[in-house]
Amino acid sequence: MSLKQKIIIIISAILFSSLPFSLYATGWDYLQPYTLSLVLLGSFGALVLAHLSIVKMRRYQTKLEQSEERLRLSLWGSGDELWDWKIGSSELYRSSSWLHPVELTPESQDFPPNKAQIHPQDLERVSQLLQDHLDGKTAHFEATYRLKGADNNWIWVLDRGKTVAFSANGKPARMTGTLKNINQLKQTEEQLQLFARCLKTISDAVVICDTNFTILEVNPSFSKITGKSREQILQQRFELSLYPSAFMHDVHKQLAKTGTWSGEIQEQHQNGNIYQAELTFDQIKDDQGNVTQYVAVFSDITERKQREAELHRLANSDTLTGLPNRAQFMQKLAELVSSKTEHALLVFDLDNFKKINDSLGHELGDSLLCKLADRLSSYSKYHRKLYRLGGDEFAIMLDQTNDLHHITSLAKELLALINQPLLVNQHELVITSSVGIVLFPDDGMDPQALLRNADTAMYHAKSQGANRYLFFNDSMNKLAVKRLQLENLIRHGLKEDYFAVYYQPKMDIVSGQLVGMEALVRFITPKGGIVSPASFIPVAEETGQIIEIGEVVLRKACLAVKGWIDQGLFQGRVAVNLSSRQFSLPYLCELIDDTLQQAELPSYHLELEITEGTVMQSPPQAIETMKKLRARGIHLAMDDFGTGYSSLAYLKQFPLNTLKIDKAFIDDMNTARGRNMVDTIMTIAHNLSLSVVAEGVEQEEQLAMLRKLRCDVIQGYYYSKPLSDSEFTQFLQEQKARRIKLSAVPV
């Protein structure tokens, strides 16, 4: 039964219950027709009024249901959750929504009621905010915090509420509110904060402009780089003071075309200094793809540019003289060759510069090079044409000329300039030079060939005497090729063991008995036969291969002597030559120790021959090395005495055992002057308690004169040529047989 029907029945019952009273009052018999009509009409009116009330009530109820539905749909659509907290009973009601995985105890004494789900780091703050509202300090409760879901992941929420009912004593009795999931919003906020921090701390300047280049915002680095404050430049047009206004117009065109522009610029700091920057402009577009702003990023690259310039200077300049170096020279030469520009190269070095370094010191040698570089570079004809290639080697590059007369005149002027005295550290030095000259394209078609041929011409000029210049020609090239082939042959010979040791006997001049021998290197190739020492030794000295050759000779000689001693054929010493490169090795003594140990040869049986020129390169160092060798029991001999730069002051300090007289003096003994020279050398040696060995003795007359001059030992073809290992074994056997025969003869 509907509400409407119930109301009608109630009203009808009321009306009809009043009829008996009316009838009783008036009497049924006396009831008139009009009276009855009035009663019925009144009853109908009452029914109409009741119906109207029912309709109005029904409309109100419908509106209420619609309002509740709208509220429910709105909350569902917004993603918010409703909560209702009865504070006194600790009952918490929550509408079902996105947070349904969160499980709360409906009746809990926790404060806040969802305390167990609030992140520990947020709990104190949320509790304080809630308490402040309950105490009436705030009109609303509002807090953002992390809430744990059933999956144990934390999500950010916005919790809002308000007290809606109070108890009789005025204390809050009920609170209602909403809970909103703001996790995505919070992540976006954190990203924005991160971006903001990055913009503040980044070292690059960031400028945001509108499409007319009006500055909207800048970061702190902008002020640091430019010296202009943020307030000074906001709403000002972005301009570069050192560039015309058309420059920014070009930037705008490029942005419209490609969406980006980048380049290196120069700008003036607020303090007046000029700085360099790397500038980039990019477009900012909205969701519809329309350009709304430009963002400019620029970094101060002044220091980097300065470092690059310094590195370029260091890479292309000689650190000692400041002249362009070899790298710059090769680059310029390559450019001239590539453009097929006629040019000439003058390559020169200083004669005997090594001796200056060794005798006066490297510091003085460096000062000499600097003073010479200053002198030459200040000469107008060499301006921007002079290069230092390394060491004491320089070059002059003359572009767009192959005029032989002009080049020759310039070479003569160059030699004259170099030959002028130089005052260096209170030393007046007069130096000479050798110049090699090449022409492009006649003397080479690439930079390497030109420089190589210029070096070749320079070495040939040096071989002809001091202070000379020489143009390159084909015959020099052939010699250079031959030298290169010999260098490769030496390298191959060391690898394949083509170096053998021959031995030339040393005979006592009085007894005629063998007292020792000199080990001489021989280069024997399978196809080419013996290569002359005069050919390969200078090349090996220059390339450094002489060190390895010397080690081979020392090792083979020690092993051979050990074998002859074990056979009872020999008890003397083997003399091994030390080259200047070997003698200057820092590990020379250790090398000799290892060789003797491996051969099991006592040091007494080894003699080392050192040339006069070698020890005079650095006498103090030579004396130190020689003392170390003598301490090991090794004998020392000075080879080719009298042919080098000898010094009697040093000679008496050298811990020598023997002096060897060069063959050139022996050959000259047929003259009185020559005999006197040999006699003088022998007198000096004997006065210093040194034995004397005469080299290159070939004639009976020479032997007789040397015997008169009291020479101790002779060596040469008079007794024997250098012998191979097997030949020397036979020679030793013959010597032994002779000694046995002589000992058998009765005295």
Image: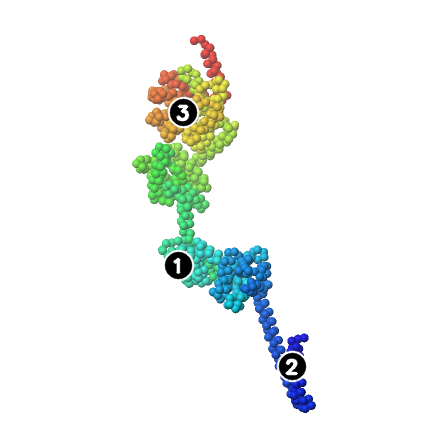
**Picture quarter containing residue 415?**
top left
Mark 3 or 2, nearer chain start: 2
For residue 229, the mark is 1
- Residue denoted by label 2: 14
Q: Describe the element under mark 3 as helix, strand or loop.
A: helix
Three-letter code, disc 1: Ser
Direction right: furthest residue:
29
Three-letter code, disc 2: Ile
Q: Position of residue 353 (x, y in %)?
A: 37, 35
**Picture quarter containing residue 228?**
bottom left
- Residue denoted by label 3: 630
Distance from the alpha carbon under mark 3 to that under mark 2: 153 Å
Mark 3 or 1, nearer chain start: 1
Label 1: few (<14), some (14–19) or many (≥20) C-alpha neighbours in 10 Å: some
Give left or right: position of 79 versus 309.
Answer: right
Name the residue: 51% across, 29% down: 496
Distance from the alpha carbon under mark 2 to that under mark 1: 91 Å
Three-letter code, disc 3: Arg
Q: Position of residue 240 (x, y in %)?
A: 40, 58
- Confirm whether residue 474 shows in the render: yes
Q: Kindly report which numbered mark, 3 or 2, lies closer to the viewer in this rendering.
A: 2
* Nearer-the-camera pick, 210 or 447: 210
Name the residue: 41% across, 15% down: 511
Give left or right: position of 60 versus 494.
Answer: right
